[in-house]
Amino acid sequence: MGFMLGVWGTIALVIVAIAAELGLRWFFGFGRPVLYRGDPTIGYLPRPNQRTRRRGNRIVINAQSMRGEAIRAEVTGRRLLLLGDSVANGGWWTDQAEIISQQLGRRLAAVWGVEVEVLNASANSWGPRHEWAYVERFGLFGSDLVLVLLNTDDLFATAPTALPVGRDRNYPDRYPRCALHELYQRYGATQKPIPGLKAVQQEGGDRVGKNLAALAQIHNLAQAQGAGMVLAMTPLQRELKPAQPRDYEQQARDRLTQFAQDHTIPYLDFLSQFNADPSPHRFYHDHIHLNGAGNQAVSEAIASLLATFLGHDGKG
């Protein structure tokens, strides 16, 4: 009797485990995270040619490690290049159709009356130095305009490094053994310290100046290839009213504003725009990332700026 109970108990556990595995895969997308690869100059970028779903949201990575479908062989309308971090990327919480680049492309196509392809070169925690290294390697893909979407923290971003790849749970370089294994890795296991990473994170000197220098290099490349450039920056949620940026953040913001003026680069700061809304916190998924309403507000404002900057026919 006890033997039979043990057998049936084991069978029940196996059934529960299989059901949990299938549920985690089909409903939450565990087991197939976006994979990354290290790079000596960019630091890291999404591994090329990936398709997956996370919590029902589609994620597509093309051959150039961008979040988007394959780049068209020919430019049939207008092509823009969006550079950014996880805000531009959209992460697992945003479906492919609703990321900022996709929304922006649809809005501009409606304004300009031509097909608009907005390429999206972005990754979690990228800063201007990652973005400069990316376009230095891959170029601008024949884009008419480069849009760099920052958030306040990006002004303090450290130098690119490949150290987190394959070591940090947020930058896997291979699939977990199963969905249950990934669930444990993300929410049960303790993140082990990564040798050398603390030194990178404690980078000294003028980080803001280094990141502004990277933006200047992107601007120089855009000018050399006959492309325009636009800057935009989203605030951290804690910067919104009734609070305000901390002193060191405001100083960095002022430097970015002066940089844009010195280089005659159109610059859209979403802090004032969000604060003009009766409930600006509604735009956020968490303390830094935008939700669907936030992506919509950003894409609408940028489309309006570009319609003014390039003209309602898409020409400067």
Image (spheres, grey):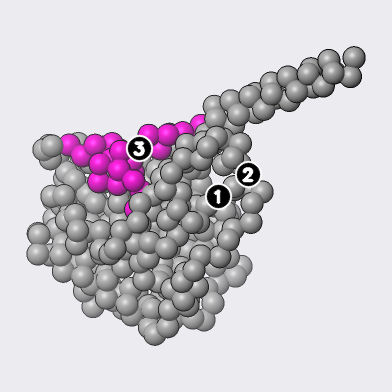
Quarter occupied by residue 222: bottom left
Depth check, mark 3 against mark 2: the one in front is 2
Judging by the rendered image, the residue that carries numbered circle 3 is 50
- Residue 129 in view in this figure: yes
- Based on the displayed image, in which of its 4 quarters is residue 208 positioned? bottom left
Gap in angstroms between the C-alphas marked 1 and 3: 24 Å
In percent of width and height, residue 51 lies at 37, 34
Residue positioned most to the bottom: 205
Residue 48 on the magenta segment = yes
Q: Nearer the viewer, mark 1 or mark 3?
A: 3
- Residues at circles 3 and 2 in contact by the CB criterion of under 8 Å: no
Position of residue 37 in the picture relative to residue 274 (left or right): left
Q: Earlier in the sequence, mark 1 or mark 3?
A: 3
State the residue at coordinates (28%, 64%). 41
Question: On the picture, is 261 further left or further right than 157?
Answer: left
Mark 3 to mark 2 CA distance (whole Å):
23 Å
Tell me the quarter of the image containing the C terminus.
Answer: bottom left
Amino acid on which the number 3 mark rests in the picture: Gln
Residue 227 to residue 23: above or below? below
> Relative to the observer, which residue lies in front, 168 or 312?
168
Q: Which residue is mark 1?
A: 285
Which amino acid, by three-letter code, is at mark 2?
Tyr
Look at the image and give the residue range highlighted in magenta: 45-72
- Is 267 part of what is drawn in magenta? no
Precedes in sequence: disc 3 or disc 2: 3
Question: Which residue is the site of mark 2?
Answer: 184
